[in-house]
């Protein structure tokens, strides 16, 4: 499935090529998606035991690695981050 970038000034942008994320980017992206889902689940059903088990499992098992990856990403120089954003977005940002 190909996704299109959002239109800019009424013009459709061309789809960008899939560029693989490095290990740290993958880990942080997966965690962000999981945590957004868990947060929504907590709002929707705040006393759901399965949600708490999933959150505890994440915190016990995965959070330390994600925090380490986040620190690696935060230590990248601004120029490197900007270049990576350009590469990943295909220049539409």
Image (cartoon, rainbow, N blue to C red):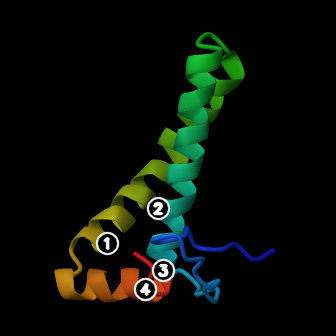
Residue at (48%, 40%) from the top-left corner?
59
Residue at (38%, 80%) from the top-left corner?
85
Give whichever of 45, 69 is nearer the camera.
45
Q: Badge 2, how many Cα within 10 Å: few under 14, some, many 20+?
A: some
Would you say the residues marked 2 and 3 are in contact, meaning their CB atoms lie under 8 Å apart? no
Would you say the residues marked 1 and 3 are in contact, meaning their CB atoms lie under 8 Å apart? no
The mark lying in front, picked from 2 and 3, is 3
Q: Quadrant of residue 41?
A: top right
Label located before the other in sequence (1 or 3): 1
Q: CA distance from mark 1 to mark 3?
A: 17 Å
Q: Which residue is mark 1?
A: 73
Q: Position of residue 38 (x, y in %)?
A: 59, 34
Would you say the residues marked 2 and 1 are in contact, meaning their CB atoms lie under 8 Å apart? yes
The mark lying in front, picked from 1 and 3, is 3
Q: Which residue is mark 4?
A: 91
Q: Which residue is mark 3?
A: 89
> Which quadrant, please, contains the C terminus?
bottom left
Q: CA distance from mark 3 to mark 4?
A: 5 Å
The mark lying in front, picked from 4 and 2, is 4
Residue at (53%, 42%) from the top-left corner?
35
Label located before the other in sequence (2 or 1): 2
Is residue 1 placed above or below 83 in the rendered structure? Answer: above
Is residue 69 placed above or below 92 in the rendered structure? Answer: above
Q: Position of residue 64 (x, y in %)?
A: 40, 53
Is residue 53 placed above or below 58 in the rendered structure? Answer: above
Label located before the other in sequence (2 or 3): 2
Question: Would residue 22 appear left or right of 81 to someone viewing this image?
Answer: right
Label located before the other in sequence (4 or 2): 2
Q: Which residue is mark 2?
A: 28
């Amino acid at each position: 499935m190909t996704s299109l970038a959002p239109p800019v000034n009424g013009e459709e942008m061309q789809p960008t090529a899939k560029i693989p994320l490095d290990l740290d980017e993958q880990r942080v992206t997966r965690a962000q998606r999981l945590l957004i889902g868990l947060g929504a689940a907590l709002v929707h059903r705040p006393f759901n035991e399965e949600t708490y088990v999933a959150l505890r499992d994440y915190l016990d098992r995965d959070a330390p690695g994600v925090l380490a990856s986040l620190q690696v990403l935060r230590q990248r120089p601004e120029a490197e981050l900007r270049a990576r954003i350009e590469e990943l977005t295909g220049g539409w940002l």
